[in-house]
Amino acid sequence: MDITITPTETAGVSRRLQITVPADTVASFEDAAARKYATQVRIPGFRPGKAPPSMVRKRFAEAVRQEAIELAINEAFREAIERQGLKLAAQPHVHDLKATPGEPLEFELHCEVRPELTLEKLDGFTVTRREAPVNDESIDEQIERLREQKAEWQPVDDKPAPGDMVTVELATADADGTLPEGKEYRIVLGGGQAIAGIEELVMETAPGGTTERSVRWPDDFPDESQRGATKLVRVMLKDVRRKSLPALDDAFARGVGDFDDLAALREAVRVDMGTHAQREADAEVRAQLIDQIITANPFDVPQVWVRQLIEGYMQMYGVPDTQKETFATEFRPMAERQVRRDLIIDTLAERESLTASSAAVDERIEAMATARNVDPGQVYAQLQKSGRLQEIERELTEDRVFAWLLEKNPVTAA
């Protein structure tokens, strides 16, 4: 295709190309668009698709012109990317389009390219492994959390105390000092669900009673307009419930899971916590390596990839529209790091031939099937249906890449 390509910016992964398509080339695209329209439109006096292209071009001039411009831009874009040898990170954007009839078509193409990493510095890093100890105290804490999950809330007639769950009817005075009808809430005292002044008012009230007095809103209240304000508050305490923990015995262990006694539960907790501690330590080691590689081998990343990652997390977390801008600003450094991490792993996997093989994936699936006591084919089908086969391959590839890196960077125990 006869076009002129002039690079106007080359910075990091950003590219800008000024593209000019000659007027006669644009005219040829108009002819093609007119012929296409001629096969589709109906014109009185002609059979469907038999109207002369010249008549179609005259009658549908604007539509033909727009179709021609779109065809010319798409063809010029493909030609420019091929000539420049660009490996695009995402679809480029057209800017400053000039499309005057009878004149050359001009526009600027903005795009980001896939970064090419050299990663010259991959050894000599300081890596420290810190694994949280699993002892009787940490096991006791975990079992207490299990007891908390199995706790029951028993009604009491006492005044409430921190930790109690209360059902209250709260009313806060309007601007003119009038107390409206109260609204019912269920609150766990001391959990930060209500401001301190209201919790104090609740704890002064006996079940079935009502207390009314002025309460000052804290200076760090989320709604700035209410910070430091003093309002009349009425509390009607309907119900008080106190947490009752189950006895720590063999019956509790059997209620938690398939354990014969408390000793078996403690051993299972010890093993689970040990496995978790190992995984956390491994993850920290990998994070130290990646951070030092990024520092030693700086490179730019396509911002379109960063935005896609941010948008994916916003969708996953259900971030409301009003908070998306704040979330994007706060999450951007983490998103950029994740993109760099993925690029480093992909580059090393390809360069050092560390990508997991099909045999390794099959072996992992067989191990999963054995652990579940099911047929490997069933596990494979489930993973394929859920789109998780690539996750298995990615996990195995990452394991191989980090094993290769750790051969070059010995780990010191903390």
Image (cartoon, rainbow, N blue to C red):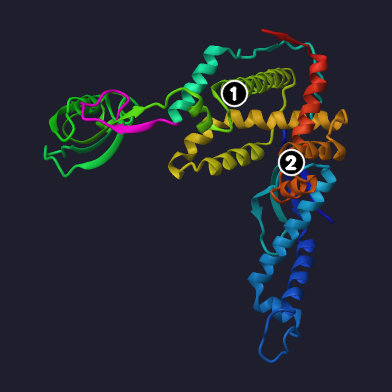
| Residue at image point 15% right, 37% down | 173
**Front in this rendered view, residue 238 or 349:** 238
Using the rendered view, name the quadrant where residue 293 is placed: top right
In percent of width and height, residue 131 lies at 64, 14
**Residue identified by numbered label 1:** 264
Residue under the image location 66 percent in, 31 percent down = 338
User: What secondary structure is the magenta-colored segment mainly?
Assistant: loop
Amino acid identity at mark 1: Ala
- Name the residue that disc number 2 marks: 373
Which sits in the foreground, 298 or 202? 202
Q: Seen in the image, is 337 located left or right of residue 116? A: left
Of tags 2 and 1, which is closer to the observer? Answer: 1
Q: Which percent across, then down, holds residue 335?
A: 61, 32
Give the residues drawn in magenta, as a range: 150-165
- Residue 117 lies, with reference to residue 99, above or below; the image says above
| Neighbourhood count class around disc 1 (C-alpha, 10 Å): few under 14, some 14–19, many 20 upward | some
- Which element is circle 2 on? loop
Using the image as rendered, state which of residue 69 and residue 334 is in the foreground: 334
Label 2 crowding class (10 Å Cα cut-off): few <14, some 14-19, many 20+?
few
232 with respect to 262 (left or right) = left
Q: Is residue 124 above or below residue 366?
A: above
At x 39%, y 26%, the residue is 245
Q: Quadrant of residue 132?
A: top right
The quadrant in which the N terminus is found is bottom right
Circles 2, 1 touching at the beta carbon (< 8 Å): no
